[in-house]
Amino acid sequence: MSPMKVCMLTTGFPRFKGDLFGSFILELTKRLVNQNVKVEVIAPHEEGLPRKEEMEGVIVQRFRYLLPTSWQRVAYGGGIPTNISKSWVARFQVVFFLFGFWLKALGEIRNCDLVHCHWTISGLVAYCATRLWRRPIVLSVRGSDIHLLEGGMMRWINGKIYEWMDVVVAVSEDIGEKLAGIGVEREKIRVVYNGVDERFQPGDKKRAREGLGLPHNRFTVLFVGLLVPIKGLEVLLEAVHQVDDERLLCILVGDGTLRECLEKQANETGLEGQVLFAGSRSSQEIPVWMNAADLLVLPSFSEGRPNVVLEAQACGLPVLATRVGGTPELVTDGSDGLLVDSGDTRQLADGIITLMSDESYRRQLGRGGRESIQKRGLTWEASALRIKEIYQEVRCQYSRR
């Protein structure tokens, strides 16, 4: 039997080996390929990248939307929503971005059996492209899509896009409920959790710190992700200031549009020696940073189902996170992590103080998180198998029309 051919549309995908941008899509796609699904990814281009390449067994085609390519500003960076909100240049380029995306998709969809889109904007492109080449469409909805459901014209537009899809995949129960709440038919909604890569395992803290050049005598709080407003990092730095303990070291792994503001905040509040901006790191390095840390903190104002929490739990690292989106599906407060209200600096500071002062409790939470991951069997292989089943289901339904 010939393999199913899937055209995967995404507005974010790793630009090089180890890039964290859209890395979860690469992880899923690799497992689909291993399960005899032929996948071709269409993603935005960035200056210096090849227009077509094979990445870890996955064919990737990157569409250009402006020449010279050094002027392209819509994708990557802090992510499309942040780029558009912060830059009038990016807003001006949106039409060119959508046209370039549609043109590339139009040429590739004719050769596939099904289209799988990541993020709602890709669903719009897929719908327009499949008016000529009729193909079923599966859309995966993530946390950043949910910000667009809060009201007004964007809520209506997104509602129409979901209506046009054959199946809408939510990465958390919370997102599934929000989709149903805006009128998406429950029969269309499937919940498929992200997996965790096997690289995330408990490791030797002393060796990890030596390898990264980190001090052994500091209580190390780690954040991993984009430095953008939705992540609540200004609240985190204020909480570090309130803790007021020189033993505390807060490490921010990642980059984004908020970095300069955060560096200024750290300097103005006297935190120069307590906040380390580690910059962007490859996905291969992240397990080492987690094994070097005492605590993962995720102070977000909104989330989908954050993979960074799963990865920390797989490493046996205790988690302190805000009670938003799908995070409470992953963290049971007091059992395998601690949850606080988003935007509450005092609660966040108290959580850090509690775990900083009680090593036994930290170990208990870390073990709880690790056991939770193992019990739920959250692997990328399982996620890919469920997605493949959805592909088969959708193709069967589509053939009956």
Image: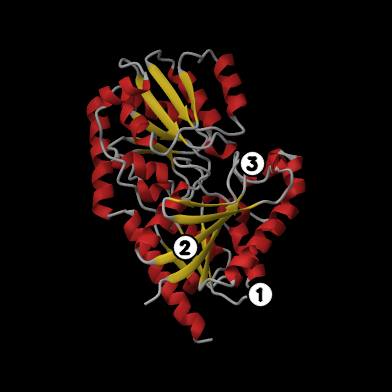
- SS of the residue at dot 1? loop
Q: Identify residue for label 2.
A: 39
Residue 56 placement, left or right of 63: left
Label 1 vs label 3, nearer the camera: 3
In this view, the residue in front, 219 or 41, is 41
Residue 116 placement, left or right of 35: right
Q: Residue at x 76, y 41 (%)?
A: 88
**In terms of sequence position, does the residue under pointer 1 or pointer 2 come before the other?**
2
What amino acid type should be assigned to the residue bearing mark 2?
Val
Q: Are marks 1 and 2 in contact (CB under 8 Å)?
A: no
User: With respect to residue 116, does 92 lie above or below?
Assistant: above
Label 1 vs label 2, nearer the camera: 2
Asked if residue 243 can be seen in this view, the reply is yes
Q: Position of residue 327 (x, y in %)?
A: 42, 47
Q: Position of residue 56 (x, y in %)?
A: 42, 50
Q: Would you identify the image quadrant in which residue 30 lies?
A: bottom left
Q: Position of residue 178 (x, y in %)?
A: 52, 59
Q: Residue at x 36, y 52 (%)?
A: 195
Q: Residues within 10 Å of mark 3 (few under 14, many from 20)?
A: few
Split into 4 quadrants, where in the image is the N terminus?
Answer: bottom left
Q: Which mark is residue 131?
A: 1
**In terms of sequence position, does the residue under pointer 1 or pointer 3 come before the other?**
3
Split into 4 quadrants, where in the image is the C terminus?
Answer: bottom right
**CA separation in Å, label 3 and label 2:** 24 Å
What amino acid type should be assigned to the residue bearing mark 1?
Arg
Q: Are marks 1 and 3 in contact (CB under 8 Å)?
A: no
Q: Which mark is residue 47?
A: 3
What amino acid type should be assigned to the residue bearing mark 3?
Glu
**CA separation in Å, label 1 and label 3:** 31 Å
User: With respect to residue 161, does 27 lie above or below?
Assistant: above
In this view, the residue in front, 286 or 371, is 286
Q: Would you identify the image quadrant in which residue 259 lies?
A: top right
